[in-house]
Amino acid sequence: MHENTPSLRSRAKALLSLHSWSGIVLGMLLYAVIFTGTVAVVAEEIGEWSNSNYPQHLMLSSDVDKTVKRLSAQTPKAYLDEISVFENDRQQLVYFFHTHKQNPSGDMDEFGVQYALNSQGVVVTEKTGFGSDLYAQDDTYALSRFLVSIHTELHIPSPWGLILTGILGLAMLIASVSGFMMHRHLFTDMFSIRKQRDGQSLKRDSHTVAGTWSIPFAILLAFTGSFFSFSTAFGIPAMGVVAFGGDQEALMYAMVGEQQHKSEAPMESANLNFMLKDAVQRQSAVPSFLSISHIGTESASVLAFFMPNEGKVGYEQLVYDGTNGDFVEYKPIVGTEPSLGSSILSLIYPIHFGTFAGLWSKIIWISLGVAACYVTITGLQLYAHRNEKNESSWQWFSRMCVWGFLGLPLCSLASAVGFFISGSMATNQSAWTQLSFVIAAACISVLSLSIKNIQQLKKLLLAGNGLFCLILPLLRFTTSGTGWLQALQHNMLAVMFIEITLLFCSVWCFFALYKSMQFDEQKSKQNTTAFSTQGTAK
């Protein structure tokens, strides 16, 4: 028994070292990915909130068949290979007529003409270009797109951003697994907050409790996040090189389960409205988008794509024969036949972002994401505190923790402020959303360097976060004219949810500020009392 003690100690020490360094070396970036990932869970709701929108299900109320025929007549024939139809966050129905070709970066992309129509069927905008560029320049998604991009790529050019987030996912996986292995008394650690006078001891216990509760969630997110990053950056391109000799178009057709060469013999297509209604009846939901291929030919087909609904976790794709309108099959996400790989792929996105049970699963995922943020924050703070005892030069680390932990939320809120203000001034919202984030980051960095007292810096950033959380609902109301009463009348759940969350965060920030000021006041009184006692003793 005693002979194994040194080896057990060395093993525990090695695990502790591995756990610490995997979390510390990339800790700040890891926190950025976790925080923005928590925000990305409600990206769809943020898109609806930022545009004061409620889904009108325009695909059901509009004559899609008539509109497609009308727009097809004015669209170049080269772009009639495929038509995507979806409703954006500004209550517009978008029709994208396109073909496929390589974009300037060498990737296969959609290229064609995109029309956005209002609820009356009038064309509001008409743009020509690559699908990736049209999406990147669309102000409708400026805020939600920017916040999601920080999470998936840290706004670093592809593929380097994806590679970095993949590495961060692995670091999170290592920290989670090693943390799990360290907790030999896992069930005891889940409830191990002891009564402590020392704030650091209390923080250590709360770090342990939050960590143990969120370990399964952290492992799940780390694995699925790394899969996303590495499969996009390496997996799919490598598959194209190895299996298809670099032919990306052949790879794309194989993955979506379509033949690369189809008959273009003219043939009248069936009514799209009938197929759409049948898909809605089968799924009891409105599709996220329609994909209409080779319309007006004997190879015409229609695909209706559905996000998870009614307790289902994976996606659903319904395929129809475009020539007669008959239902063909429930199509797997990848390939032509149902497979384990396709089933797993259809589960990864809903599980990673918590979209499988609507708003309730998203609330759970947000709560667990906040717990993961707290674990990262307290872990780095405890490490900084331990080193500050030995070296005063480690105060820069504590300052960096405050700068990152409170600065990133403030910058994210500032990007939303920039979105609303630029929208009211009819300027480029996509550019100003990003620029507002950068300006806020620069200001926070200057304050972090100029304010010597770390506690004062913390108070200032807490106040800034609380103030911006209060300002944003007012800004949204001012720019849209849609108040809470109208939101309730039109069942605008996303607007209500985001603004209640913002108000809750504002209350939390000001409460934390109050507690911090109260703590400083008590500490000042204790120091005064101690000084008076020393003077009396002398």
Image (cartoon, rainbow, N blue to C red):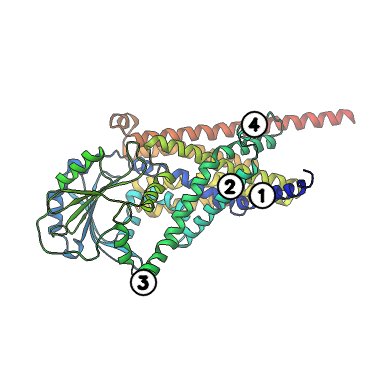
Tag 3 or tag 4, which sits nearer the N-term? 4
- Mark 2: secondary structure: helix
Q: Is residue 494 shown above or below 23?
A: above
In the image, which disc is placed on residue 271?
Answer: none
Q: How far separated are the C-alphas under marks 1 and 4?
A: 23 Å
Question: Residue extending furthest right?
Answer: 538
Amino acid under disc 4: Ile
Q: Is residue 158 visible?
A: no
> Pointer 1 and pointer 2: residues touching (CB < 8 Å)?
no
* Residue 232 in which image quadrant: bottom left
Tag 4 or tag 2, which sits nearer the N-term? 2
Q: Is residue 525 shown above or below 137?
A: above
Q: How far separated are the C-alphas under marks 2 and 3?
A: 38 Å
Amino acid under disc 1: Leu
> Pointer 4 and pointer 3: residues touching (CB < 8 Å)?
no
Q: How far separated are the C-alphas under marks 2 and 4?
A: 22 Å
Q: For mark 2, what is the residue?
A: 177
Q: For mark 3, what is the residue?
A: 245
* Residue 460 in which image quadrant: top right
Label 3 crowd (10 A; few <14 / some 14-19 / many >=20): few
Direction from residue 197 to residue 298 in the image, left or right: left
Label 1 crowd (10 A; few <14 / some 14-19 / many >=20): some
- Mark 1: secondary structure: helix
Q: Nearer the viewer, residue 171 or 74?
A: 171
List x then y, in percent, for residue 30: 55, 50
In the image, which disc is placed on residue 15?
Answer: 1
Direction from residue 414 to residue 329 in the image, left or right: left
Amino acid under disc 2: Val
List x then y, in percent, for residue 308: 33, 42
Tag 3 or tag 1, which sits nearer the N-term? 1
Q: For mark 4, what is the residue?
A: 193
